[in-house]
Amino acid sequence: MRLIHMRSLMLAVLAGLIGLLAGAAARILYLLIAVAGNLVFHQRLSATLSSPVGHGLGWAIVVVPALGGLAVGAMARWGSPKIRGHGIPEAMEAVLFNDSRISARVAVLKPLSAALAIGTGGPFGAEGPIIQTGGALGSLAGQAAHVTPAERKVLLACGAAAGMAATFGTPVAAVVFAIEMLLFEFKARSLVPLVIAASVAATVHQSLLGPGPLFQVAATDFWSPQALPFYALLGLACGVLAALFGKALYAVEDAFERLPFHWMWWPAIGGLGVGLIGRFHPEVLGVGYDLISDVLNARLALSALLAVVVFKSGALLVSLGSGTSGGLLAPMFLVGAAFGGAFAMVLDAAFPGLNLSPAAFALVGMAAIFGAASRATLALILFAFEITQNYQAILPLMVVGAIASAVARSLMPNSIMTEKLARRGLSIAQDYEVDVFHHLAVEQVMSRHPVTVDAGETLAVVGERIRKNGHALLHQGIVVTEGGMVTGLITRRDIGRLLAEGADPATPVGKVATCPAITAHADEPLLAAVGRMLDHDIGRIVVVARDDPRRLVGYLGRTALLQARRHHRRQECEIERGWFPAFKGRWGRDGTRLN
C-alpha cells in the first residue's frame, strides 16, 4: 500500500511539472504564431496576435498560405509525418497502440509546423498542436521516469489536458476532455494528476494572458421555457452539420489521396485554396479568436455569420484535408458559434416576437457542433459553462449537446477523431463502462461440481477415465484431492502428454499435478481471480472455502469467463416483459416479441 502511495505522489509531482511545461509551450507557440502572422501580413515585428484583415498584400495573399503549406509538407516528409493533421487522433493512437510513446521530434516539430501554417494564414487554432505537444511532453516524462505503460498514459493525458487548459483557461473542461479523448478510464489514479496538471497550466494561462478564459462573453439571457423547442431544433441541425462536416473532411482527404504525386506537396495545394478564399474573405484566415469573441457577443450581422460558416468551413476542409498542421477546435468553434447565431437570427426574422438571443444560440452551437463531431459532449458542455460562468447556460447546453450528439452518432458511426484511425484498421471504442468482471463474484459463474481424482490414482487409471468420459473433461482441469482436501490441479492435456512421452502409467497423479493449486474464493470479485490466472499464466483456477483453504467448493475455467460475458450481453440486449398490459405477450430468448 505504501508503494502505491509513493507512486501516486510521483505521478502528482510529474503532473505538476508537465502542467508548467505545457503552459510555457502554449505561450511560446502563441508568440511564434503572432510574430509570424505580423511579419507576413503586416510587415512588422510584434508578439500580439492580429487578424490578417487589412493586410495590404493584394493578390499576393493567394500564395502565402501555399508557401506555409509547402514548408509544413517538407517538415513532415523529412522530420516526422506525425505532425500532419490536427494531432488528437495521433495522440489517441499513441495511447492505445504504442504504449503512450510519442517521440521528442514530434514535441519540437508540431508547434513549429503549426506556427508556420497558422502564421501564413492557415485557418486553424493553436490548441490542437498545443494539446499534441503537451501530450508529447507528458509521454517524454513517462519515458524518462520509471513508470508502467498505464502510468505513462496518464502522464500523456496530463500533458494534453494542460495544453487545453493553458490555451483556453478552462481547467475543468480540459480534464474531462482528456478523459473522453485519451484516457478511456475514470480512476482516482488518473484524475488527481490530471487535475494538478490542468490547474497548473490554467495558472500559467492567467499569469501570462490575464485572468479568466480566452473568450470573454457578456451577460446573456440563455434560458426561457418558450425557447426550449428552438434549442431542440438547433440540436438537430448541429448534429446534422457535425456529421456532414466529418464526412466532408474525409471526402477531401480521399480526393488528395488520389493525386498522382507525393503527399509532401498536398499542403501547398490546400494552402493555395485557402489563399483564394482569403483573397475575398481574409477574416477566415488565422486563429480567429477575436472573431469568435465577436460572434459570441453578437457583434456580427446575419450576412457576416453566414459568410463565416461557408468560407471558414471551406478553408478548413481544404487545408486540413490536405494534411497540413493545425488545430481543429478553434475553427469548428467559430463555425458552430456563427451557425448558432445565424440560426437564432433567422428564426427571429421568420417569427417576430420570439426574441431569441443570437449570443446564447452562438455559444450553444459552438459547444454542440464540436462536441457532437468529436464525441466529447460533456467536455464541451463544461467548456462553454466555464467561459460564461453563467449557470443558466447549462440547460440549453445539455439539451442541444445531447440531441446533436445523438444525431451525429446515427449519421456517422465514427467521430471526426476516430474516423482517421478506423481507416487505418484501428478500432477505437469511445463508450466506457465498468468491466463485468468487477461486479460479478466468482461463485456466480464457477462450476460447483468439478471433476476430481484422488492423488493416489495412477496415470493409467485417470487416462482410462478420460478415454471413457473425454467429452466431460474437454474444457476442464481435474482437481487432485487427498482425503477430500485439495492438493493440486492437472489437465486432460497434461495427462495425455505424459502418457505419450512414455511416463510410467503407474505414477500417481499427485506427483505430476500442479501443486499447490492456485486458488480463489467464491465471494471475491471475478476480476481478482482473473488477475491471479493471468499472473500465473494459467487458464483455470480452483475455488476453495475462505475458512478452510483446502476445502473444495468449485472450479473456474475459461468457459466460465465466457459465461460472465454472456451474462453481461444478456443484460444489455435481451428485452424483458414489462408489467404494462399493452406489451404483454410471448417473447423469444433474444427479447423480441413473438405475438
Image (spheres, rainbow, N blue to C red):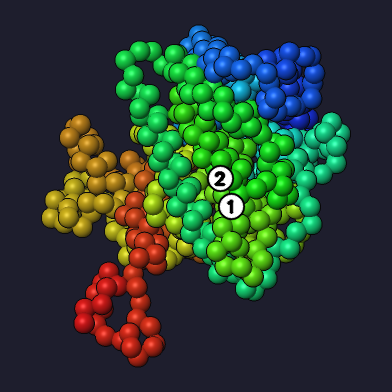
Where is residue 290? Give x, y as percent: 72, 37
Q: Which residue is the site of mark 1?
A: 342
> From mark 2 to mark 1, how far is it between C-alphas?
7 Å
Which residue sits at x=52%, y=32%?
316
Q: Is residue 49 left or right of residue 577?
A: right
**Is 95 rendered above or below residue 119?**
below
Q: For the residue marked with disc 1, what is the amino acid?
A: Ala
Query: Does the residue at mark 2 contact the one at mark 1 (Cβ under 8 Å)?
Result: yes
Which residue sits at x=34%, y=19%?
259
**N-term mark: 2 or 1:** 2
Q: Is residue 44 left or right of residue 549?
A: right
Where is residue 34? Give x, y as percent: 73, 22
**Residue 376 appears in the picture as rendered:** no
**Is 344 rendered above or below residue 173?**
below
**Is 437 rendered above or below residue 196?**
below
Q: Which residue is the site of mark 2?
A: 306
Q: Quadrant location of residue 152?
A: top right
Quadrant of the frame with the C terminus: bottom left
Between 478 and 507, the residue placed more toward the observer is 478
Q: Quadrant location of residue 181?
A: top right
Q: Quadrant location of residue 72?
A: top right
**Residue 212 appears in the picture as rendered:** yes
Q: For the residue marked with disc 2, what is the amino acid?
A: Leu
